[in-house]
Amino acid sequence: MPLKYDLDKIRFATDAATFEKAVDLCEKGKVTRFERGPYGCSAIVLGTHPYKVYVENQHYDQGGCECYVAQKNMLCKHMVAVAIYAVKGGKKLSPEEKMAAGGPKCSGKLGELDNEELSLVKQTVTSSMKYIKAYEGPSKVWFAYQDSLQEGCNRLAKVVSDLPVSRQTASIVVDMLLRLDKKLCQGRVDDSEGIVGAFIEDAVGVLEEYVKLDPSCAQAFAALRDWETCFDWEKRLVGLIESKDA
Ligand SMILES: [Zn+2]
């Protein structure tokens, strides 16, 4: 069975600290005796002890490890290291591949997307939005559900961070935030941990930076004027249009 995950899946679905430690284990050659089987990959990962690790080909977070983290049924850095090793075939990671997921950032580069880039961004936004879905229970899937919200936000954050700065891309971010807002207000998304809310706050901060770099970006916020969002995040941006009008 071929691997059903790739490096982006591992990056966006693993918390940043675990991902970074796993990358470090790979880089330092701690993944040894790697073997690829029909259903999963096994290896001995050298940590505090040598740990026998198994990771399923279908789900990188399913399998097992002898360390105490995995014994508590949590995803450990050893399993993530084996998964990374598997997708890279043991090859070194590029500096970009080593980057853990994080919040949205302003790229700081002025520019617009061409049609091809624009349609790719739209597709990625739509596919990332699928992770931010309605909560339907049961309560035993609560943690997996929150992980899914986090993965969606991580994927969207990467889209935002890669965008050049212009009125065009400001509109893309505004549209993304309105879609998320709709999900929170009407889509039965249960964001009690504040994962999506924090993403929206951070992305609003990115848009504020856009306006500092290119004041015409504020025109993209006009779409927010008649909108009442679920926690009034739009006010910071609408305020920026008015200060430009003055
Ligand atoms: Zn482990």
Image: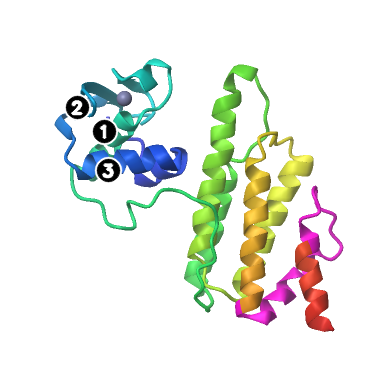
Query: Which mark's residue is nearer the viewer, 3 or 1?
Result: 3
Horizontal side of 12 relative to 181 (left or right) equals left
Residue found farthest to the front: 48
SS at mark 2 in the image:
strand
Is residue 234 on the magenta stretch? yes
Name the residue: 22% across, 20% down: 52
- CB under 8 Å between discs 2 and 1: yes
The residue tagged 2 is 43
Percent across and percent down for residue 173 are: 63, 62
Whether residue 162 is visible, yes or no, is: yes
The answer for how far apart the CA atoms under marks 2 and 1 are is 7 Å
| Residue identified by numbered label 3 | 24
Q: Vertical placement of 120 versus 8: above or below?
A: below
Please tell me the numbered disc located at residue 106. none
Give the extent of the magenta segment. 213-235
Q: Residue at x 23, y 41 (%)?
A: 26
Q: Tell me if 144 is positioned left or right of 232 in this view.
A: left
The image position of residue 246, as x and y in percent, is 84, 84
- Mark 2 and mark 1 lie on one chain; the one further toward the N terminus is 2
Distance from disc 2 to disc 3, alpha carbons, whole Å, reads 16 Å
Residue 166 pos. (x, y %): 60, 76
Task: Give the residue at mark 1.
Answer: 82
Where 58 sits versus 163, above or below?
above
Count residues near mark 3 (Cα–Cα under 10 Å), then give few for <14, some for 14-19, many for 20+.
some
Under mark 2, the amino acid is Ala
Q: Residue at x 30, y 26 (%)?
A: 55
Q: Quadrant of ligand 1?
A: top left
Secondary element at tag 1: helix
Residue type indicated by callout 3: Asp
Q: Is mark 1 within 8 Å of ligand 1?
A: no
Q: Quadrant of residue 95?
A: bottom left
Q: Is residue 63 magenta?
A: no
